[in-house]
Image (tube, rainbow, N blue to C red):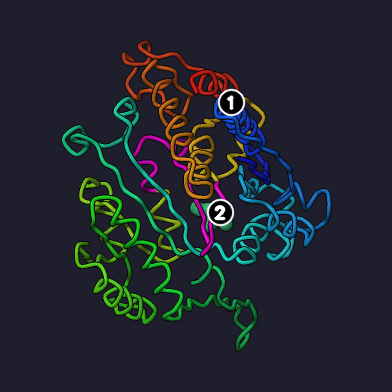
Amino acid sequence: MKLNIVCIPGDGIGPEVVAEAKKVLNAVADKYGHEMSFTDILMGGASIDACGEPLTDEAIATAKAADAVLMGSIGGNTSTSPWYKLPSHLRPEAGLLKLRKALNLFANLRPANLYEELKEACPLRDDIIGDGFDMMIMRELTGGLYFGERSTKEVDGVMTAVDTLTYNEDEIRRIAIKGFDIAMKRRKKVTSVDKANVLDSSRLWRKVVEEVAKDYPEVTLEHMLVDNCAMQLVKNPRQFDVILTENMFGDILSDEASKVTGSIGMLASASLNDTKFGLYEPSGGSAPDIAGMGIANPIATILSAAMMLRYSFDLDAEADAIEKAVKKVLEENYRTIDIMPQEEDKKATVTQIGTAKMGDLIAERI
Ligand code: IPM
Ligand code: MG
């Protein structure tokens, strides 16, 4: 199969982790006889530095013409980087939001599962971890607070900032359908997360989700308020299968879920539209504090590449091969610094390695 992949290395640790994912994809291409071409585009701070804006129209056109996009991460230190002195529409994150909107990537899938081998890195108590957990956060990605009108201006002599949270029923319906479809392939439970005790947008969300649920009689639907969900994720993460939620709640809850699994460096993600096209990226950020040190965990990006093979190209065997190779390397007790055991005496039982070595080992095991 011929796969035309556009890569966005981006900022911070992005270029380091994308390089490892490419390594692994090349190993897959060799083994399974696929032809993969990679084209890089700039986004975020890298694009601001080179082109004066976080994402150019040419870059969007290149991404649109691809079969799928593989991204690292964008952005820098929000207190020290000169990028954050720019007006908000020229900052690194604006590039990513523009791309999500331009490609209509409304469905963001963020799986969070606990690897048996990483139980030692999980901050939860053993009795809470039990035999592990496996959930999928389905985050709406092109609506809500991220894309509503905003302004900062003086009102009656007082500086006042406004962000608006808007959802229409069609936007809610299409993400709910994706959520229920995914649940049908999993343990058939959807937890729809909202703040319906306060927000109108959440009350509409709940109503539409209930309508969609009628078409999925096999799926159990429950509603949960977002503050309670934040608590339940650390109290009893095993209760969750699919968490279906709006943009901002999903942003926050997916970081929390990833930490519960041991490290944000393990969490992959897929952002999909109504076609087979998707953008795949680690859920974590650009980690400017460790950029260039060669210690970032590339596994989330490598697993995102596996999601790409599965969702955009229907290459299930190839995706399985990547996921198995990752598991194998963990079983062989190789760890990047972020997934080292927390207790001193357990540290000696594993080998700490850097980004490139982790990529090499996974590629070798394809
Ligand atoms: C994420 C990130 C982005 C988001 C930022 C970089 C705009 O935190 O993908 O979770 O908030 O969506
Ligand atoms: Mg986030």
> 148 or 102: which is nearer to us?
102
User: Furthest-right residue in view?
Assistant: 51
Q: Position of residue 32 (x, y in %)?
A: 55, 29
The amino acid at mark 1 is: Ala
Q: Residue at x 49, y 50 (%)?
A: 270
Q: Is residue 217 shown left or right of residue 211?
A: left
Q: Residues within 10 Å of mark 1 (few under 14, many from 20)?
A: many
Span shown in magenta? 256-280
Confirm whether the magenta stretch covers residue 234.
no
Q: Is residue 277 left or right of residue 256?
A: right
Camera-side residue of 45 and 188: 188
Q: Is residue 309 above or below residue 321?
A: below
- Amino acid type, label 2: Gly
CA distance separating discs 1 and 2: 21 Å
* Label 1 element class: helix
Residue 173: assigned label: none
Q: Pointer 1: what residue?
A: 27
Asked where in the image residue 19 lies, by quadrant, the reply is top right
> How far across and how far down the image is residue 103, in percent?
62, 63
Give residue 231's quadrant in the image. Answer: bottom left
Q: Position of residue 341 (x, y in %)?
A: 36, 23
Residue beneath label 2, please? 278
Position of residue 357 in the picture relative to residue 243 (left or right): right
Q: Residues within 10 Å of mark 2 (few under 14, many from 20)?
A: many
Q: Residue at x 33, y 40 (%)?
A: 113
Residue plotted at (26% across, 75% down): 210
Instruction: Report if residue 276 lies within the magenta region.
Output: yes
From the viewer's perspective, is 285 left or right of 328?
right
